[in-house]
Image (cartoon, rainbow, N blue to C red):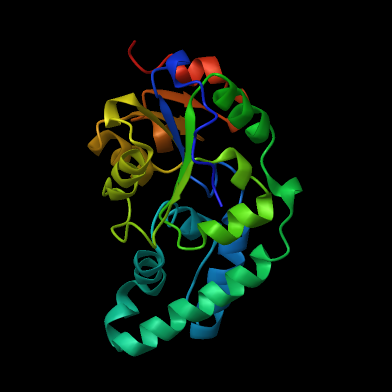
Amino acid sequence: MVSDGSSHPASKCDRVALLFDLDGVLTDTSELHYLSWKGLADELGLPFDRSANDALRGLGRRESLALVLGERSDRFPEQKKVEMAARKNAAYLERVARMTPADLLPGVRALMQGLRERGALVAVASSSKNSEAVVDRLGVHDLLDALVDGNDAPRSKPDPQVFLLAAERLGVSPRRCVVVEDAASGVAAARAARMKVVGVGPPERVSAADRTVATVAELTPDMLLALVEP
């Protein structure tokens, strides 16, 4: 599954950990989510566009469903909501099954490899409950020391649970962690965890981060490690 970290020369960086969000950071699954939510919304006769999909960035499945249903949410019994969420997820996983390592965003593999060469620990920390499947399709398990997702940390971002659990599993203090996020809720979660955070995407979305970049390709190991105090 993931490395135990035993090959890392930890003295090089005194156990710094990089916690990467998955969707929108390592790969662009936004379109897959959009098509899957759009299919459900069309069935229900609800409006849903890419702008609405962007509002779901960083949220868990049930929180996303509540936004998709909007004012009509209270009209559906709980069991119906469970069925709708499961139907959307099944449609999403069908699309995930067609992903390949080519869907890894430019620069991601080299960035992770560079971080490990410098002794940093690397983890995925995502609210998604499908992280394992996506990471499998991307072929990056060999570059991870931990994978923590919504199955482990059910409280969605902006709650810091997923980041704090990742730090705990890695044996690293939160103050020695740097989060890479593309969602406002993720940036807020990292701040709540007392971690440094780099925001990827439009400044208006991730402006609360310690540093912002337009794309992951702009990141370098030295840039990320420099955010942690010696």
Quadrant that contains the C terminus:
top left
Percent from the top left, x then y, of residue 222? 53, 15
When the figure is inspected, residue 176 is found, relative to residue 82, above or below; the finding is above
Percent from the top left, x then y, of residue 68? 42, 70
Give the residue displayed 54% in from the left and 84% down from the top: 43
Visible residue check, residue 35: yes
Kindly indicate the quadrant of the structure image that contains residue 11. Answer: top left
Towards the viewer: 169 or 151: 169
- Specify whether 138 is left or right of 65: right
When the figure is inspected, residue 201 is found, relative to residue 82, above or below; the finding is above
How many tags in the picture?
Answer: 0
Give the residue displayed 36% in from the left and 69% down from the top: 62
Towards the viewer: 20 or 141: 141
When the figure is inspected, residue 227 is found, relative to residue 181, above or below; the finding is above
Percent from the top left, x then y, of residue 184? 37, 42
When the figure is inspected, residue 37 is found, relative to residue 225, above or below; the finding is below
Residue placed farthest to the front in the image? Answer: 6
Towards the viewer: 173 or 64: 173
Give the residue displayed 46% in from the left and 25% down from the top: 212
Residue placed farthest to the top in the image? Answer: 230
- Specify whether 204 is left or right of 7: left
Give the residue displayed 60% in from the left and 52% down from the top: 135
Visible residue check, residue 76: no
Kindly indicate the quadrant of the structure image that contains residue 59. Answer: bottom left
Percent from the top left, x then y, of residue 49? 54, 63
